Image: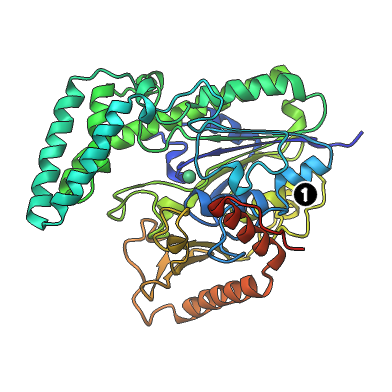
């Protein structure tokens, strides 16, 4: 019988920035993940290979840079090799449970290779009803309000006055409404996703399996489970959470007013992290109970981080590549081979799939572009390849082709240095992260010339290789899929 793990569990937590794991300055955010550190590899400098979700997951699941098939291509290409398609080929049972993320859908290829693929989007067969669908009257009111807002904003002075009046009106109506956290939440919480996973495991874990969970608990709007908030010692109730969320989402508010609410927003976010941690604990307990714990490789990470005004921004739009947005937690437990080790060497999530395949002793497909670091991890050796992250600048709606075609942003991390280039603005900034972990003081132009040159060469090589090794078959298949979905008719498939 083959030694080592025979199955794989991958958990991605949306918006979980690296520095929110193991937070012990206040209440613990992730007591369970911390407890796993004793027999896991804990990567201290793991980076999403693209942000947000739709630029991160292709690298994570298909080990391919997000813009490698062309900026107009989104999602997993038809016929592209992913962790799921390859393990399915190897005879694994496969399942994915995604907590209602519209960018992780079958239409964009994410269900490929999964026996069971369940997203919890509105209209799916599910027990979960997202909050925005609670009242049709509300949505009629919102539509009317949007028209009024547009009319008012055609005159700058009137627009600002309208914003303030509307916000005050919302605050008053919120105070009269006692909707609970559970009613306000837009996605199923982690307990719902873990329940589905446990039911599936009961039926499908006799042989090798691949289980992927994508949890949304820390994602905005921030409505965590009330129990998690209590455990964290927070006294924010659901009415206050509504006020905080509506204010935080408001455009054009002064940074002084936003900074006043930052603590409350972070407390709500931390509640979501805590709940995800608690449910991952429940899943792992079940694996122990089913005698699967020492047969499974486990990887826990995030698709990207989240900003809380660190550099003046909110949420996770791809408008910069600062640490709070691209550095993610990564924990990997491989039975029999992990010795509880912190790994400081930077790694990109594009390298995770080949590393996991190596740990499972299964050859990675030729289409995976990342590199396995499994051998080096086992032998306690370092590696020195650069870690790259790329996105289309400002693309917050990938369903609109023109936003996808925006200029590229690219960051290169090597050693303690990180170069961030924005081709839209023609700017580049070099940071030395050991002395400036918050990236507030880019090194002045003309300094660290050798490092700057080396990282620029890495960037240039990356762009050249992306073009040279572009898989035109996958590119055309993706374009045809998009045309079919836009025009609603069958087009001939490329050979
Ligand atoms: Zn995301």
Tell me if I can see residue 291 in this picture. no
Q: Judge by depth and name the residue closer to the eye, 15 or 451.
A: 15
* Quadrant assignment for the C terminus: bottom right
Vertical placement of 202 versus 156: above or below? above
- Where residue 20 sits in the image (x, y, percent)? 42, 40
Q: Residue at x 16, y 30 (%)?
A: 171
- Where residue 465 sits in the image (x, y, percent)? 64, 73
Q: Left or right of 223: which side holds 81?
A: right
Q: Residue at x 11, y 45 (%)?
A: 162
Q: Left or right of 422: which side holds 457?
A: right
Tell me where residue 132 sits by quadrant: top left
- Where residue 322 sits in the image (x, y, percent)? 40, 58
Q: Residue at x 18, y 32 (%)?
A: 170
* Quadrant assignment for the N terminus: top right
Density class for disc 1 (Cα within 10 Å; few <14, some 14-19, many ≥20) is: some
- State the residue lying farthest toward the front: 489
Q: Which residue is mark 1?
A: 358
Q: Judge by depth and name the residue closer to the eye, 488 or 123.
A: 488
Q: Left or right of 247: which side holds 19?
A: right
Secondary element under disc 1, as helix, strand or loop, is helix
Q: Judge by depth and name the residue closer to the eye, 357 or 62.
A: 62
Number of callouts: 1
Tell me where residue 331 sits by quadrant: top right
Q: Residue at x 44, y 24 (%)?
A: 129
Q: Left or right of 346: which side holds 365?
A: right
Vertical placement of 374 versus 231: above or below? below
């Amino acid at each position: 019988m083959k030694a080592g793990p025979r199955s794989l569990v991958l958990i991605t937590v949306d918006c979980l920035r690296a520095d929110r794991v193991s937070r012990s300055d206040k209440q613990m955010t992730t007591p369970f993940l911390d407890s796993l550190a004793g027999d896991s590899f804990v990567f201290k400098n793991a980076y999403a290979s693209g942000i947000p979700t739709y630029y991160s997951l292709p690298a994570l699941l298909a080990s391919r840079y997000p813009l490698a098939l062309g900026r107009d291509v989104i999602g997993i290409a038809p016929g592209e090799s992913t962790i799921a398609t390859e393990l399915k080929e190897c005879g694994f049972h496969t399942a994915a449970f995604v907590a209602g993320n519209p960018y992780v859908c079958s239409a964009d290829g994410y269900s490929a290779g999964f026996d069971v693929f369940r997203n919890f989007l509105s209209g799916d067969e599910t027990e979960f009803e997202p909050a925005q669908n609670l009242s049709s009257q509300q949505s009629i009111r919102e539509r009317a309000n949007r028209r009024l807002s547009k009319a008012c904003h055609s005159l700058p002075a009137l627009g600002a006055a309208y914003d303030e009046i509307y916000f005050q009106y919302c605050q008053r109506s919120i105070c009269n409404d006692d909707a609970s956290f559970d009613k306000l939440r837009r996605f199923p919480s982690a307990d719902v996703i873990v329940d589905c996973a446990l039911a599936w495991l009961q039926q499908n874990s006799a042989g090798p399996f691949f289980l992927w969970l994508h949890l949304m608990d820390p994602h905005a709007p921030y409505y965590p489970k009330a129990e998690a908030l209590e455990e964290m010692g927070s006294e924010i109730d659901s009415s206050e959470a509504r006020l905080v969320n509506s204010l935080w989402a408001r455009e054009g508010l002064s940074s002084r007013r936003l900074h006043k609410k930052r603590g409350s927003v972070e407390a709500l976010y931390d509640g979501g992290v805590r709940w995800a941690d608690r449910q991952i604990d429940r899943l792992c307990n079940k694996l122990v109970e089913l005698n699967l714990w020492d047969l499974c490789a486990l990887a826990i990470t995030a698709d990207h981080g989240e900003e809380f005004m660190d550099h003046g921004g909110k949420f996770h739009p791809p408008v910069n590549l600062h640490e709070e947005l691209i550095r993610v937690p990564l924990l990997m437990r491989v039975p029999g081979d992990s010795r509880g080790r912190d790994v400081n060497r930077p790694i990109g999530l594009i390298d995770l799939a080949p590393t996991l395949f190596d740990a499972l002793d299964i050859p990675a497909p030729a289409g995976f572009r990342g590199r396995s670091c499994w051998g080096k991890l086992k032998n306690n050796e370092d590696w020195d390849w650069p870690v790259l992250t790329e996105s289309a600048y400002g693309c917050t709606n990938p369903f609109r082709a023109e936003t996808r075609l925006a200029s590229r942003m690219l960051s290169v991390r090597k050693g303690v240095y990180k170069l961030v280039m924005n081709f839209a603005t023609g700017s580049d900034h070099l940071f030395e992260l050991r002395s400036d972990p918050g990236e507030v003081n880019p090194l002045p132009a003309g300094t660290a010339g050798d490092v700057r040159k080396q990282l620029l060469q890495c960037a240039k090589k990356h762009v050249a290789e992306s073009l040279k090794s572009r898989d035109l078959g996958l590119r055309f298949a993706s374009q045809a899929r998009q045309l079919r979905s836009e025009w609603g008719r069958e087009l001939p498939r490329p050979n």
